[in-house]
């Protein structure tokens, strides 16, 4: 008997998998790498890998791409407090996991969800919606809260003993920590608040992107994660690197779709603006670039595809009121 377990790198998902493994089921891990789940410090996927390693199971990672961005644009079940479409995101993950289940001929899916632990996606009604919309009704086993939920197919068919499942609910972590101790699970990340879409500042940037560039791509999301962002009166976006690491990332992301500005002869930031920018936008971006140089700068290099231009700045060309 095979089952697929959603693995996030947190304790709950590791426990969900472990509880079922203890009943003799062959468990395979599955995780989704979201464009918004990457923190600056550690990618969420590496936590999942560490967790799968400790459990001794295979992990399949699905990289969410353009199809996930469509969900962020138009979530069927709406947003949470910020731009986080948690329920739709959950359903997306379940659908992708279902495809993996089919591929490896697994009979059911395991999640580490705990009833009432998270406000948007771990309510009983949200779980029911997720089960239905993912096409996995009856096939999603939630071992930590199973005794509080309707019996699932694996329980009804006797593949899994319901008696050996749990009735944990709420936000207290004590029961899970006791189980971790019992099963010897040591490697797990502490519960994070959520992905970048739950952060107010990032959500503000996201809303700006959706308004001014509704057909945004994955590369636009990467750009949202770095630098200082300015929106000029024309609607053109200006991004300014804050340090060498960000400057290098901006250089990598620049491509043909962006105009690049750099100060001439003095240390300073890499600046990107959209290729559609007009002459006035480019001049304003040059002034912004000068503001973040360590020394006074007189000339800014402007690179647009194969074209190179030099902007000469006057002393008075300083602006500071476009920051958002
Ligand atoms: S916090 Fe982000 S990654 Fe997590 S469920 Fe919500 S939208 Fe998805």
Image (cartoon, rainbow, N blue to C red):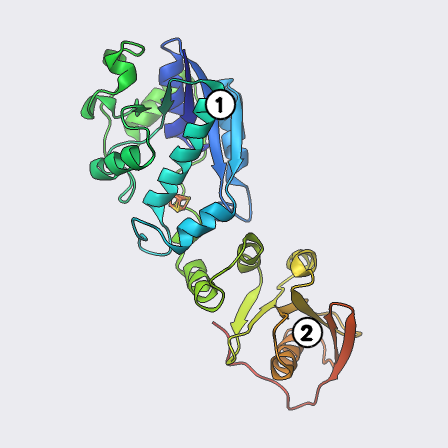
Across and down, in percent, residue 134 comes to 34, 34
Q: Secondary structure at mark 1?
A: helix
Q: Quadrant of residue 153?
A: top left
Q: Is residue 181 left or right of residue 123?
A: right
Q: Quadrant of residue 164?
A: top left
In terms of depth relative to the viewer, which is nearer, 45 or 26?
26
- In the rendered image, residue 128, in percent from the top left (x then y), is placed at 24, 34
Front one among 10 and 308: 308
Any atom of ligand 1 within 8 Å of the CB at mark 1? no
Residue 228 occupies quadrant = bottom right
Report if residue 172 is visible in the image.
no
Label 2 within 8 A of ligand 1 by Cβ = no
User: Mark 1 vs mark 2: which is more N-terminal?
Assistant: 1
Residue located at (29% from left, 24% from top) = 144
Q: CA distance from mark 1 to mark 2?
A: 54 Å
Q: Position of residue 29 (x, y in %)?
A: 47, 24
**Residue drawn at (56%, 54%) of the image:** 222
**Residue where numbered disc 2 is placed:** 293
């Amino acid at each position: 008997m095979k089952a697929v377990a959603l693995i996030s790198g947190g304790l709950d998902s590791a426990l969900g998998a472990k509880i079922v493994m203890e009943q003799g089921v062959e468990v395979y891990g599955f995780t989704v790498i979201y464009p918004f789940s990457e923190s600056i410090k550690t990618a969420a996927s590496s936590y999942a890998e560490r967790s799968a390693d400790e459990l001794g199971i295979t992990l399949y990672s699905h990289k969410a791409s353009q199809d996930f961005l469509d969900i962020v644009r138009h979530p069927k079940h709406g947003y949470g407090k910020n731009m986080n479409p948690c329920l739709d995101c959950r359903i997306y993950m379940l659908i992708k996991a279902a495809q993996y289940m089919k591929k490896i001929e697994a009979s059911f899916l395991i999640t580490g969800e705990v009833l009432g632990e998270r406000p948007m996606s771990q309510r009983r009604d949200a779980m029911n919606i997720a089960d239905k919309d993912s096409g996995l009704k009856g096939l999603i086993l939630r071992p930590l809260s199973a005794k509080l939920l309707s019996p699932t197919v694996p329980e009804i068919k006797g593949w899994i003993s319901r008696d050996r499942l749990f009735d944990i609910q709420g936000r207290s972590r004590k029961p899970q920590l006791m189980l971790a101790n019992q099963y010897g699970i040591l490697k797990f990340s502490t519960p994070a608040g959520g992905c970048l879409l739950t952060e107010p500042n990032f959500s503000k940037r996201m809303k700006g992107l959706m308004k001014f560039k509704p057909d945004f791509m994955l590369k636009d999301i990467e750009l949202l994660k770095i630098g200082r962002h300015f929106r000029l009166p024309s609607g053109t976006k200006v991004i300014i690197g804050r340090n060498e690491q960000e400057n290098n990332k901006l250089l990598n992301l620049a491509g043909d779709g962006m105009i690049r500005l750099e100060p001439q002869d003095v240390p300073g930031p890499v600046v990107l603006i959209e290729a559609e920018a007009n002459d006035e936008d480019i001049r304003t971006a040059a002034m912004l670039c000068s503001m973040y140089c360590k020394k006074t700068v007189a000339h800014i290099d402007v690179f647009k595809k194969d074209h190179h231009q030099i902007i000469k700045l006057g002393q008075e060309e300083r602006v500071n009121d476009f920051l958002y």
